């Protein structure tokens, strides 16, 4: 829309959902999922001066009824009992609790319900018109299933918020997931819905958890054609990643014409991430929110809710990548140059690895990939296959 | 896995005296590619494929509204004798038959009577189940020496990490007869501690395994 094309997009009223209590979602000290990254990001942003008191929105607890929009009552009950240390091992296993991925911890229900509540706050902040966009970095736990915890996720706040938006506001929601892992929990929740469209771009499931997210998973019944998956190859790198992302994002948004966009901004596709092999750099984390921001204004009058997600290099990658997300959401331009010295000084001794000193990654972070051309070509082919459905709809004779 | 666990039990058949026209109609209506031909005791005496039937049908360029060819009896074109399998055969034996005989379907008989059919599609479905790709999991590949006791040693390491194994496959190493590749699908999003332990004990872990990329 023309009125948003000019300067008035430069600065959008945005909400940043935050509480130090997000760190209560804590499995154990050696677990790769560590919410300390939200604190690190918050402090980094505070140092830049681009996050102010007026932006901060404290999260609330989600009610059982709200969690029940997606999860079974028996599962919620099991999570509560687990958090009190009263769930038997056999029962826990039935619900995916007490595994290496989702170990049991004290008050796990309360900690998880706070993340969900934060995401619901973000949605209300935008949909009640108080803010254009909102960000909850504590959320984005896309692997949680109806009655099963998995892949570090207990309650699936992304799925819950979509159902909440459908019920409360009657909006059609586009969910875009750029985590390096397939957004399976959200996809399966809405697999037969035509008023929720899911788009997930992720490293192929040949090696990586959860293994699903193939290009032929397109939805079922009324939901057919409302689920898009683009599994990209290990060693994909920036250019091919961004080609796939931008094309898919533009085509799917134009095809679905959502009322609101929910993005899951996992930042585990970076070269430094220990769990994945996509070889992205900070460049993709400037570009991903940039396009989402533009399309939210073009199609949804700005209505955009962004969530966190994966991100397992919590020192070198997550704080910078998520700060860029906030910066672009609120001002449309990324940070560049040096990181604030105060932040570096505060954390350099706690970090087990040397902290990067600039917003951008240095050149030659890794050795060149020998099969780059082949991988790029293969990703392009996967993208074309995924977009074929949209092309076919456009080319229908009537 | 046994044939009786994967075969379809509702089989559409024809008697030998049925016409080619009947066969064409059945193939189109049911979206199937093979029809077993049975006698009155339900013994399989022949089989026709969609290609057999089409070869015996008039060309679509002919404009005859009532072609004579379609009135021929199916027994004139059916293949015989028919390769059959038993419900207690293994699905991998069926796969070997498909490969060796270059066919895509076998009737299943018990006491010489037709009880089911197994097709290529059933075999592929079983393969998908075997690989475990339908379960939330990560895949790791380990190159190991081809000798006694390696598999239990490796699974022991997985067991220590309390991670469930969805599937195990053992492939020959294409370049090296003395080695095998073990492929595990394991129910965890974080295989790193396992990979570290495997490497510590001297195993070569390929994650991911891409020729020309990973050493």
Image (cartoon, coloured by chain):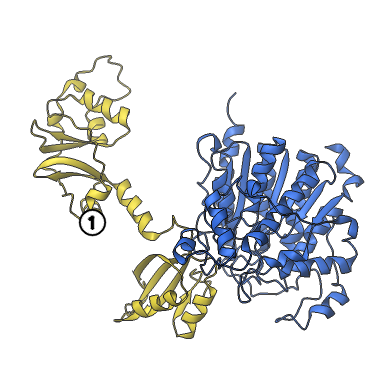
Secondary structure category for the residue under label 1: helix
Position of B45 compared to A121: left or right? left
Q: As displayed, is residue A201 above or below residue B78?
A: below
Q: Can you give x and y, in whole percent of width and height, for residue A377 in the image?
A: 57, 56
Which residue, given by chain and number where applicable, does mark 1 sit on? B96
Confirm whether residue A233 shows in the render. Answer: no
Q: Quadrant of the N terminus of chain B?
A: bottom left
A316 relative to A268, above or below: below
Q: Position of residue B174 (x, y in %)?
A: 36, 71
Q: Is residue B164 visible?
A: yes
Chain bearing tag 1 is B
Colour representing chain A: blue
Expressed as whole percent of the image width and height from the top left, the position of residue B24 reads 26, 27
- Extreme residue in the top direction: B65
Task: Chain B: give its colour.
Answer: yellow
Q: Tell me which residue sits at (50%, 54%) in the image.
A: A212
Q: In this orientation, which residue lies closer to the viewer: A108 or A281?
A: A108
* Residue pictured at 59% horizontal, 57% vertical: A202
Please indicate whether residue A239 sits to the left or right of residue A147 in the image: right
Hey, which quadrant is residue A110 in on the image?
A: bottom right
Residue at the image position 44 percent from the left and 64 percent from the top: A90
């Amino acid at each position: 829309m023309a009125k948003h094309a000019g300067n008035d997009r430069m600065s959008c009223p945005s909400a940043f959902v935050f509480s130090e209590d997000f760190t209560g979602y804590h499995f154990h000290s050696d677990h790769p999922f560590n919410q300390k990254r939200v604190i690190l990001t918050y402090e980094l942003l505070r140092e830049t001066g681009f996050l102010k008191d007026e932006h901060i929105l404290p999260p609330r607890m989600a009610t059982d009824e709200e969690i029940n929009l997606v999860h079974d009552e028996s599962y919620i009950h099991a999570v509560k009992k687990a958090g009190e240390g009263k769930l038997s091992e056999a029962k826990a296993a039935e619900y995916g609790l007490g595994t290496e991925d989702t170990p049991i911890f004290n008050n796990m229900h309360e900690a998880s319900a706070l993340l969900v509540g934060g995401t619901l706050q973000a949605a209300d902040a935008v949909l009640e018109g108080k803010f254009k966009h909102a960000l909850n970095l504590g959320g984005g736990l896309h692997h949680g299933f109806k009655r099963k915890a998995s892949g570090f996720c207990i309650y699936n706040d992304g799925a819950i918020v979509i159902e909440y938006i459908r019920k409360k506001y009657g909006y059609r929601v586009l969910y875009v997931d750029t985590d390096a892992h397939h957004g399976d929990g959200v996809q399966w929740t809405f697999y037969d819905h035509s008023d929720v469209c899911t788009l997930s771009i992720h490293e192929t499931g040949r090696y990586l958890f959860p293994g699903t997210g193939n290009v032929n998973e397109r939805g079922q019944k009324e939901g057919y054609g409302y689920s898009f998956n683009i599994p990209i190859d290990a060693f994909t790198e920036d250019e091919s990643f961004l080609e796939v992302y931008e094309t898919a994002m533009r085509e799917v948004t134009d095809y679905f014409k959502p009322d609101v966009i929910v993005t899951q901004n996992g930042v585990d596709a970076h070269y430094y991430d220990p769990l994945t092999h996509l070889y992205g750099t900070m460049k993709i984390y400037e570009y991903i929110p940039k396009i989402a921001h533009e399309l939210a204004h073009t199609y949804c009058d700005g209505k955009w809710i962004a969530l966190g997600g994966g991100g397992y290099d919590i020192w070198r990658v997550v704080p910078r990548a998520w700060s860029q997300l906030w910066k672009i959401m609120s001002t449309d331009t990324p940070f560049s140059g040096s990181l604030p010295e105060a932040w570096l000084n505060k954390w350099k001794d706690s970090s087990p690895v040397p902290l990067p000193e600039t917003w951008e990654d240095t050149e030659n972070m890794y050795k060149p990939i020998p099969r780059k051309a082949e991988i790029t070509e293969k990703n392009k082919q996967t993208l074309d296959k995924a977009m074929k459905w949209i092309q076919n709809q456009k080319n229908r004779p009537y | 896995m046994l044939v009786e666990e994967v075969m379809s039990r509702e089989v559409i058949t024809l008697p030998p005296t049925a016409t080619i026209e009947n066969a064409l109609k059945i193939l189109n209506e049911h979206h199937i590619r093979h029809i077993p031909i049975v006698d009155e005791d339900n013994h399989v005496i022949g089989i026709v494929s969609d290609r057999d039937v089409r070869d015996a049908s008039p060309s679509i360029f002919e404009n005859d509204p009532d072609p004579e060819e379609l009135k021929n009896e199916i027994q004139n074109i059916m293949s015989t004798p028919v390769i059959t399998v038993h419900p207690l055969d293994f699905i991998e034996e069926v796969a070997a038959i498909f490969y060796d005989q270059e066919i895509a379907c076998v009737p299943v008989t018990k006491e010489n009577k037709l009880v089911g059919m197994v097709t290529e599609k059933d075999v592929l479905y079983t393969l998908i189940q075997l690989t475990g790709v339908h379960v939330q999991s990560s895949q790791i590949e380990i190159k190991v020496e081809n000798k006694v006791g390696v598999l239990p040693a490796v699974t022991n390491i997985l067991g220590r990490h309390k991670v469930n194994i969805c599937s195990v496959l053992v492939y020959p190493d294409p370049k090296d007869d003395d080695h095998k590749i073990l492929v595990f699908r394991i129910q965890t999003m974080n295989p790193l501690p396992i990979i570290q332990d495997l490497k510590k004990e001297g195993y070569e872990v390929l994650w991911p395994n891409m020729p020309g990329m990973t050493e």
